[in-house]
Image: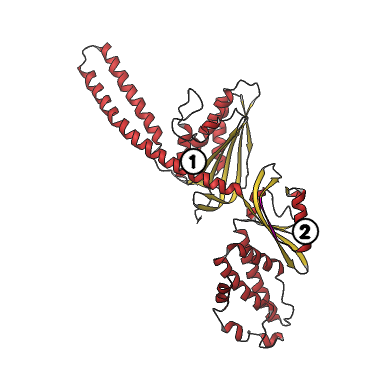
Amino acid sequence: MVRSMSACATIQPNLVQEPWPGSAVCGHSLQKRPDFADKALLFGALVCFLQLHWQSTVLVALLLLVQTNQHPHCATAMCQKRSTRFMTISDALHRLLLDNLTTATILLNADLRLEYMNPAAEMLLAISGQRSHGQFISELFTESAEALSSLRQAVEQAHPFTKREAMLTALTGQTLTVDYAVTPILSKGDTLLLLEVHPRDRLLRITKEEAQLSKQETTKMLVRGLAHEIKNPLGGIRGAAQLLARELPEESLKDYTNVIIEEADRLRNLVDRMLGSNKLPSLAMTNVHEVLERVCSLVEAESQGCITLVRDYDPSIPDVLIDREQMIQAVLNIVRNAMQAISGQNELRLGRITLRTRAMRQFTIGHVRHRLVSKIEIIDNGPGIPAELQETIFYPMVSGRPDGTGLGLAITQNIISQHQGLIECDSHPGHTTFSIFLPLEQGAAST
């Protein structure tokens, strides 16, 4: 790493030896640079670190962010203007770097109060960094007394440390399993603490998602092959029944051939539903809340007041590029399943279905990282999905009800996949959540 940094620093050797423009005006000797020129060289080193060790950039960027100030020695307006312009560009780049990191980054002062958190940390803890500025760390999330003691020791002794599999409780009540590294930073005589937080459940989620996508592709191939083998003889059976009906002399006998034809058509439709729609989505910019409101109007008419619908919307979510009718069908399938599960339980409590929307930053779907994603949650207080079905709930012909076809969720998953989205399910008795993630931008980074 040291050799690599040296190579980066010596790409332009004349930059160190030649006099800095305007140095005589500023009162500097020709052999010494102004401080802001040193920062330019340091920023070049930052770029090299970015290519070689991305984690090091977090520390370097924060150091520059908290320590950049106006050059104290420039006496002329020309140098002040040049210094201010450099710092404006530099600050913007540092902020851009931090805002686009997928690692949750938190900066605390010596009193363990929040100085800064990037969007990844805001998403992880479900809080606003701007509103939480100056708050004590225990007001952001709950940690053990031992962890707080370690943080105070890190401030007093300038001693970095790393903690594995720490349990954090966010203000929302969600428990997070994370690894985090703490690095003390000396800035203007004060000690700051840099926390880099890596949620372990994110890695587990990505692994689970990849396995789910692999199973989904395998199931699709199996269904396509099976459908082909079924549809071919069905066509022959239907054609033979039609020919037989023409030859029968009595109308009463044609009732039997009509049954054969109708059942062949029913099986063909069932196979087509298993395969999903071959129609490509007709994409248009759509307000996702219009989709949810349409679903609510249909459900309220069907439930006749037996189900309470709760709307928990984030109005700041921008329009998303979707097929409106297909997305209504996808969400409606989930909500109807929830209604049927609630109505099937013997308890007297009122059924409740919550439709919630949130915006998520730096979210990975498949191997693509999206800067902004729309999250739709359908939450019900029904009996829950049996544990043995949760791994296969999106497979065709899998249902938890005796009268269920097992096609609704398979169709929903197919629609979401066509929109480059993701659907997940989390269920236990009394609480089931289906989460739909839809990208809000076209450009994304591969991971």
Query: What stretch of residues is rendered in magenta?
Result: 159-164
Residue visible at 58% across and 34% down in the picture: 427
Q: Amino acid at mark 2?
A: Gln
Give the residue at mark 1.
324
Secondary element under disc 2, as helix, strand or loop, is: helix
Which-is-in-front pick, marks 2 and 1? 2
- Image coords of residue 32 (percent x, y): 67, 84
Q: Position of residue 110 (x, y in %)?
A: 78, 60
| Residue drawn 58% across the image and 30% down it | 384
Local SS, label 1: helix
Q: Earlier in the sequence, mark 2 or mark 1?
A: 2
Coordinates of residue 303 in the picture (x, y in percent): 57, 25
Whether the magenta-drawn stretch holds residue 163 is answered as yes
> How far apart in space, not on screen, are marks 2 and 1 (Cα)?
55 Å
Q: Nearer the viewer, residue 13 or 423?
A: 13
Query: What residue is shown with label 2?
Result: 153
Residue placed most toward the observer, 342 or 13: 13
Q: Is residue 129 left or right of residue 300?
A: right
- Depth check: 60 or 299 in front? 60
Would you place residue 306 above or below residue 272 in this image? above
> Looking at the magenta stretch, what is its main secondary structure?
strand
Q: Is residue 193 above or below residue 440?
A: below
Which quadrant, please, contains the N terminus?
bottom right
Q: Residue 20 falls in which quadrant of the image? A: bottom right
